[in-house]
């Protein structure tokens, strides 16, 4: 298929990279966005969905290939390992009862805009990744070639995709239990995703009893949705995680199945969903959770890295909504003191961020902070603040997690080092890596110093680099000085604001995420100025980012009462 020249218009922060100024995160984002937009030459331009009901045919494939394609060109970035963290993140937003499915009707312009969300991008990309694994990469590739060639310059619907994939499957040496269309129909037209509850049929039996139900954050809610689910497993007696083809398909017509697994009775532990290729959660019986915690503590490398991340994410989320005792989640997490890979720590960081919010102000909060400091100490000592040219690409993300947790939770060495580094920056005696600037600047502002704030604010005003501006905007919200915080918040709505409209939502997001006091101040500011904020940030996207940040931080009845004021205002405006 010939390439057609296209014109892409991007913001500077999504296109321009400058060594020693641009963060690794922004650099990765630039590569990802460029790849994403190029993928649209095929999925979106050459072949277009017949209507916005099928937005995922564009954005799901672009999301998948932005990572898969970048991984082929820059394997050291480990984009397909990082994809598991993306999948885990979208499982959070996809776990509410009224979430839209991948395929859903749209009729109005506002509904069209609403389709460009995490379901169309990250969920659809994750389901496409699952499809690649249950079909095999070769069949998946051959099917897409057929789909694109057959339908070029035309409008398509999902059945045309399924037909091409089915033909490629039929021409291969592989087979699956149902037609591709039958499987994908449920995954694309039902919202949410399943959780598998897995039990040994008996201690000495060679079979598992598996049930499926829709996973919902609110466990009091019930849904009758079911899926055809690709299942595979690993036993402790043969810990080989490489083959991700399904070993069993759970039917959608039944909520329970028995799976015969030769040798299961001799296995100390087992893992379902190799490399978390399936878009679902797994809950085990208490005995297997404890066995997994034991093997992780003893030799965590026996379990594949992506499954270590899966085990952490599943355990803490299942505990979060009462499906699992938190004891087992923390038992699993004890091994992290020996974990050196970013992917597993990315999953743990998401879990710890949630607990930080809900435990803040409680008697258990100090114990939680001490626990996190204890298991991060080896990595803090190893990574520190010193960025080297030998660092892996993902080390920048890993270091940020460890430094943020340690400085936020009161590691004296971390706080002192960060504040000392900021003083040296102010005195022009050192320059620091852009990858550590946020934690250094943020720690330096938590003490409430007006001098530090004014220096960084002036640096923002003087900066001509969008990447540096982004770092500074995210850091300035960390100030604990209420007067300076109010000045900063008012930059969102001030007529003479020095911050560009498309960046103003970052001010509120940074204050919300800075501390409990910052969250309270930002919430009060949003309630008092909601109408002005909507007009001052860049449309729906900016407002959505602000409200999402608040939603992740509000936990009390008092917060609920305050939020109702925003809801009331929105309802009045819509009348």
Image (cartoon, rainbow, N blue to C red):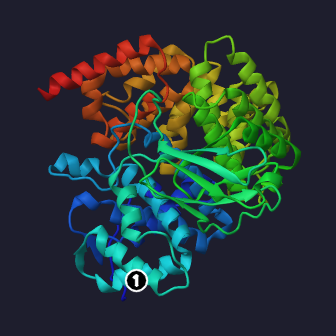
Confirm whether residue 438 shows in the render. no
For this view, does 251 lie left or right of residue 43? right
Residue placed furthest toward the left: 575
Residue drawn where x is 38% and y is 42% of the image: 224
User: Which quadrant of the structure image shows residue 166?
Assistant: bottom left
- State the count of labels: 1
- In this orientation, which residue lies closer to the viewer: 43 or 394? 43
Q: Which residue lies furthest to the right in this view?
A: 298
- Would you place residue 285 above or below residue 12 in this image? above
Categorize mark 1 by other alpha carbons within 10 Å: few (<14), some (14-19), many (20+). Answer: some
Q: What element carries label 1?
A: helix
Q: Which residue is drawn at 41% across and 34% down?
A: 548
**Picture layout, residue 260 above or below residue 214:** below
The x and y percentages for residue 276 are 61, 55
Answer whether residue 243 is visible to the viewer in this image.
yes
Residue 331 picture location, percent across and down: 77, 33
Reply above or below: 427 against 469: above
Where residue 168 sits, quadrant-wise, is bottom left
Locate the C terminus and report the quarter of the image it occupies: top left
Picture quarter containing residue 318? top right
Where residue 438 appears, as percent x and y from the top left, is: 62, 38
Closer to the camera in the image, 23 or 559: 559
Does residue 374 appear left or right of residue 243 in this picture?
right
The residue that disc 1 covers is 167
Q: In which quarter of the image is the N terminus?
A: bottom left
Relative depth, front residue between 481 and 84: 84
Residue 458: where, in percent of width, then height? 51, 34
């Amino acid at each position: 298929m010939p390439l057609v020249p296209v014109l892409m218009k991007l913001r500077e922060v999504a296109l321009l990279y400058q060594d020693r100024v641009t963060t690794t995160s922004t650099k990765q984002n630039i590569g990802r966005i460029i790849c994403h937009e190029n993928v649209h030459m095929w999925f979106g331009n050459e072949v277009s969905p017949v209507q916005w009901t099928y937005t995922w045919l564009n954005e799901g494939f672009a999301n998948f290939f932005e990572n898969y394609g970048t991984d082929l060109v820059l394997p050291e970035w480990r984009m397909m390992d990082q994809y598991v963290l993306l999948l885990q993140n979208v499982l959070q937003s996809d776990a509410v009862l009224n979430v839209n499915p991948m395929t859903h009707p749209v009729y109005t312009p506002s509904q069209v805009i609403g389709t460009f969300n995490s379901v169309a991008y990250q969920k659809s990309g994750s389901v496409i990744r699952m499809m690649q694994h249950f079909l095999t990469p070769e069949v998946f590739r051959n099917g897409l070639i057929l789909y694109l060639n057959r339908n070029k310059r035309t409008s398509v619907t999902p059945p045309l995709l399924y037909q091409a994939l089915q033909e490629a499957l039929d021409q291969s040496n592989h087979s699956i239990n149902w037609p591709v269309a039958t499987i994908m129909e449920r995954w694309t037209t039902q919202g949410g995703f399943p959780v598998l509850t897995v039990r040994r049929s008996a201690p000495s039996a060679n079979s598992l009893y598996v049930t499926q139900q829709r996973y919902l954050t609110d466990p009091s809610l019930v849904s009758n949705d079911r899926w055809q689910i690709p299942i595979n497993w690993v036993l402790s007696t043969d810990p080989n995680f490489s083959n991700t083809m399904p070993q069993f398909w759970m039917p959608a017509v039944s909520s329970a199945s028995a799976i015969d697994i030769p040798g299961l009775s001799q296995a100390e532990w087992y893992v379902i969903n190799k490399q978390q290729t399936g878009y679902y959660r797994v809950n085990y019986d208490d005995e297997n959770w404890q066995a997994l915690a034991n093997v992780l503590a003893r030799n965590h490398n026996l379990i594949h890295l992506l499954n270590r991340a899966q085990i952490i994410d599943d355990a803490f989320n299942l505990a979060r909504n009462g499906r699992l005792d938190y004891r087992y989640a923390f038992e699993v997490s004890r091994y992290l003191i020996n974990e050196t890979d970013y992917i597993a720590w990315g999953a743990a960081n998401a879990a710890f961020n949630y607990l930080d919010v809900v435990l803040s102000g409680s008697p258990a909060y100090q114990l939680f902070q001490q626990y996190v400091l204890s298991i991060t100490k080896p990595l803090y000592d190893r990574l520190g603040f010193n960025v080297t040219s030998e660092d892996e690409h993902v080390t920048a993300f890993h270091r940020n997690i460890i430094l943020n947790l340690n400085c936020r939770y009161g590691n004296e060495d971390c706080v002192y080092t960060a504040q000392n580094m900021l003083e040296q920056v102010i005195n022009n005696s050192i320059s620091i890596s852009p990858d550590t600037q946020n934690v250094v600047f943020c720690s330096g502002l938590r003490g409430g110093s007006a001098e530090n704030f004014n220096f960084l604010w002036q640096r923002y005003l003087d900066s001509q680099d969008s990447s540096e501006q982004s770092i500074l905007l995210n850091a300035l919200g960390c100030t604990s000085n209420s007067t300076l915080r109010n000045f900063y918040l008012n930059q969102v709505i001030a007529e003479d604001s020095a911050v560009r409209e498309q960046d103003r939502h970052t001010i509120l997001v940074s204050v919300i995420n800075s501390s409990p006091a910052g969250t309270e101040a930002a919430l009060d500011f949003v309630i008092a100025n909601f109408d002005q904020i909507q007009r001052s940030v860049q449309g729906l996207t900016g407002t959505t980012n602000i409200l999402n940040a608040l939603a992740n931080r509000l936990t009390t009845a008092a917060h609920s009462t305050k939020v109702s004021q925003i809801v009331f205002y929105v309802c009045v405006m819509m009348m």
